[in-house]
Amino acid sequence: MRDLRWRTNAKNILYCYFSNVQQLHEVENDVLLRSRSMRDQRFPQGSTVDNTALGVIALSRGEAEYLRRSVQAVRLLLGRLSTGRRVDLDRLELLKLIYFRAETSLYGAAIRLDISERTAKRWNDQALRFIAEHMGWLQEEKPGMNMPGKKDAAKAELTC
C-alpha cells in the first residue's frame, strides 16, 4: 500500500483497538467453546447454523488473523510508550486523548498537553507509521524506525 490510505487504516486500528480486542476474544471463544448461537446471514430467515462451521469460515477468511495482527501492533506501540519517560508518557496521553477516549482533536490534545501543534502532528505521524510498518503497509521502510525503544518488531493487520 504505497498511497496514503495506510494513514487512514492506521487511524482506524487505533480508534477501534478496544472493540477489536473484544471481537478477537469473542471469535476465539466461539470457535473453541461454541459459546453463542450464531445466525446464518446468507439467508433472510436467519436459520441457526453450526457454530464451528461459521467460526472456521471466519478464520479461513483471515479475519481473526487480521484482528490478531492489528491488536499486536497496537500493543507493541503501547509497550514502547510505557517506558516511564516524560516524553513517552506525553505521547501515550496524546494517543489516549485522540483515539482511545476520543475526547479531542489533535490540536485540542496539543493544547491540553502544552505542546506545539507541530510536535503533536509529528508524534501522531510517528505512531501511525509505527502501526503501518507493523501491518506491512510500508514495506520499503524498516519496522521500528520512527519510535523509541526496541528495533525488532512483528508485522500485523486490522480494521474496525
Image: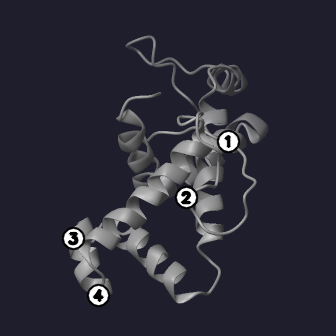
Disc 4 marks which residue?
114
Dot in front, 1 or 4:
4
Type of residue at label 1? Lys
Q: CA distance from mark 1 to mark 2?
A: 15 Å
Mark with earlier residue (2, 3): 3
Type of residue at label 2? Asn
Q: Residue at x 56, y 30 (%)?
A: 38
Tag 1 and tag 4, C-beta contact below 8 Å: no
Tell which of 42 and 134 is nearer to you.
Answer: 134
Describe the element under mark 2 as helix, strand or loop.
Answer: loop
Disc 1 marks which residue?
155
**How many residues crowd around disc 4 within 10 Å: few (fewer than 14), some, or many (20 or more)?**
few
Q: CA distance from mark 2 to mark 3?
A: 21 Å
Q: CA distance from mark 1 to mark 4?
A: 33 Å
Disc 2 marks which residue?
146
Type of residue at label 3? Tyr
Image height check: is 24 above or below 124? above
Q: Which mark is residue 107?
A: 3
Mark with earlier residue (2, 4): 4
**How many residues crowd around disc 3 within 10 Å: few (fewer than 14), some, or many (20 or more)?**
some
Describe the element under mark 4 as helix, strand or loop.
Answer: loop
**Residue 4 at what x, y percent from top left?**
35, 35
Q: Residue at x 72, y 58 (%)?
A: 151
Q: CA distance from mark 2 to mark 4?
A: 22 Å
